[in-house]
Image (cartoon, rainbow, N blue to C red):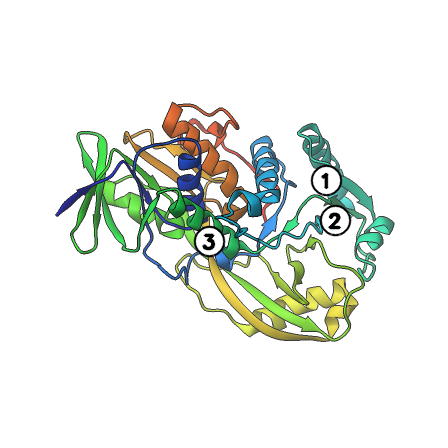
Amino acid sequence: MVKHTDIIIVGGGVIGSSIAYNLLNDGYEGEITVFEKDKLYEFSSTPRSAGGIRQLFTTPINIQIGRYSLSKYLTFAKDMAIGDERAEIDFEQHGYLFLAQHEEMEQLKKQKELQNAYGVPSELLSKEELLNIIPEVNTDDLEGGLFSREDGYLDPYSVMQGYARKAKQMGARYIYEEVYTILTNKGDVSGVQLDDGTKYNAPIIINCAGPWAPMLSETVDLPIPIIPLKRQIIQFDISEPLTKRLPLTIDPTGVYFRHEGDSLITGFSEDVKPGIDFSWKRALFLEQLWPILANRVPNFERAKIQSGWAGMYSHNTVDQNAIVGEHPQLSGYYVACGFSGHGMQQAPAVGKGLSELIRMGRYETLDLSPLRFERFAENDLVIEGAIV
């Protein structure tokens, strides 16, 4: 059985759904079919993320993406409303804070200057000023920090569902089946084949399959430098509440923490073997995170684990940044993957950019060409210094 559509998006998470929404919102009149193998989004990367929204990056492209996406998340509830039902995402602008020791302050100063040049109101804080943000923080080994008041965190599952519901309402068709392979014909994509053998023809395929994106691309012998890496998040309670709501705070060790309701969540980029693995361990908190947290904020000394979970980073092994655009070796084959933990916060800009590239053949709102696949062969890498 062969069916026909105009655009196929493989992966109905936040990236795929943002692309579908932006295409339709920008006036695309063809049929968009989104394939998502996980109907309940049980193992989707988006709802398992820490939900951070930031502009505190070190490269122009990521700073611009962060600033654009922030503007869209501020109006998301209204923009994605269906009738009178707003798409609430619980965006809390408590800020983003990178804590720094003495040797790191000069680098943060340069980052601040670049961010300010692109309109980000980031601030360099002294160790005394850190206490205005987190009164309980231990600053003995700190020199200061880099802070953005506009940033914060939100509910990533609600963002993903908001995009998906709006895309469906505008005409996108979601099919909850797994794509087995991409089909080609004389150097062009021609469609996909599902696990059950059903074929869908389309002249445009967009690979948004997250940690499964490289496996899909290998079905047409086009490797993508992405590996899945497990990232664990632990939710915990403390006996003595903090005075203020936390910004999403990154310790010099790489451990991050923020509020999650009245509880807190924490995690870091641990060294793990590549592979799909959704297990989480209390030992991560007890042996690695807790000592660092308790040293940084004394209130964390009396902590109790509430829950935990693990999700997948689609880790770009070359430069840890997204790969966005048409593949140079296969006409009609687009990729939007390899976000290395930044997918949810970059989804609005990537959706808008790919909508323009597909409809008009060029970027207009934001030039995403630095993230093109060709940068690897051209050795024109995007080296981001603020990876969490």
Crowd band around label 1 with a 10 angstrom C-alpha radius: few (<14), some (14–19), many (20+): many
Res 43 label: none
- Residue 328 placed where, x, y %? 33, 29
Residue type pointed to by label 1: Leu
Q: Of 163 and 169, which appears nearest the observer?
A: 169
- Residue 53 placed where, x, y %? 61, 47
User: Relative to 372, does residue 10 appear above or below in the rendering?
Assistant: below
| Residue visible at 79% across and 46% down in the picture | 102
Earlier in the chain: of badge 3 and badge 2, it is: 2
Crowd band around label 3 with a 10 angstrom C-alpha radius: few (<14), some (14–19), many (20+): many
User: Viewer-nearest of labels 3 and 2?
Assistant: 3
| Residue visible at 48% across and 54% down in the picture | 46
- Residue 106 placed where, x, y %? 75, 38
User: Viewer-nearest of labels 3 and 1?
Assistant: 3
Give the spatial CA distance, label 3 vs label 1: 35 Å
Does residue 380 appear in the picture of this structure?
A: no
Q: Secondary structure at mark 1?
A: helix
Q: Which residue is mark 3?
A: 161
Q: Secondary structure at mark 2?
A: strand
Q: Which residue is mark 1?
A: 108
Give the spatial CA distance, label 3 vs label 2: 36 Å
Q: Which residue is mark 2?
A: 100
Residue type pointed to by label 3: Gln
